[in-house]
Image (cartoon, grey):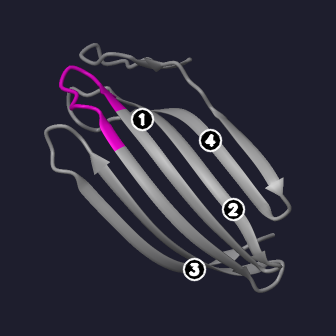
Amino acid sequence: YLNRMIDDPRLTDIGSFSVDGMLNWSPMRGTTLNAALSTALESSTTADQSGSVVHQLSLGLEHQLRAAVVAKLTGTALRRNFRGTAAPADQTTLGLTGELDWSINRYLSVVTEAGYERTSQPGTQDSSTARIGIGLRLRR
C-alpha cells in the first residue's frame, strides 16, 4: 500500500493499493516476452489537487534477429487517477514503441526507435504523440 500524507489541510492524502512486478519468459533462444505492472504516486503542481495514482501495464517482445541486432516491440497502458477537491477526470494513455538495437561492439550500439502514444481524458480533446529517434547506447 502506498500512502502520501500532505501537510496542507486543504488537500487530501493520496493512497492506493500498490502492485509492482515483472514477469519474463523465454519460449525459445533469442526471444523474450515480458509483462510488467507498476503503481506510483505523483504530486501535483496545480492548486487544489493532491496529485494522482498511476497504474501502468507494459507488455513487450524482444527478439535477437542476428548476433548483433535485437528488435523490441513494447505496448503500454497507463491509467492516471487524479485526487483532490478540484481533480479532473481520470486519464488513459495507450502507447506502442518499436526499437532496433545494432551492437557495434560490446560497449557501443546504435539504437533506432519509433513510437506512438494516445492520451484521452473525458472533457478534453484527445492528444497523440508520434516520435522517431536514433541514438547511441554506451554500456559498461
State the residue in front, 12 or 115.
115
Q: Are marks 2 and 1 in contact (CB under 8 Å)?
A: no
Amino acid carrying label 2: it is: Glu
Residue found at x 62% / y 54%: 60
| Above or below: residue 75 compared with residue 22 | below
| Above or below: residue 1 compared with residue 64 | above
| Above or below: residue 89 compared with residue 74 | above
Amino acid carrying label 3: it is: Gly
- Badge 3 is on which residue? 135
Residue 62 disc label: 2
Asked which quadrant contains residue 35, the reply is: top right
Q: Which residues are magenta?
A: 81-92
Mark 2 vs mark 3, CA separation in Å: 19 Å
Q: Are marks 2 and 4 in contact (CB under 8 Å)?
A: no
Q: Are marks 3 and 4 in contact (CB under 8 Å)?
A: no
- Badge 1 is on which residue? 42
Of the two numbered discs 3 and 4 on the same chain, state the one appearing first in sequence: 4
Residue found at x 28% / y 18%: 11
State the residue in front, 75 or 136.
75
Q: Check disc 3: other Cα within 10 Å, few if <14, some if 14-19, many if 20+.
A: few
Q: Name the image quarter holding the N terminus.
A: top right
SS at badge 1: strand
- Badge 4 is on which residue? 36
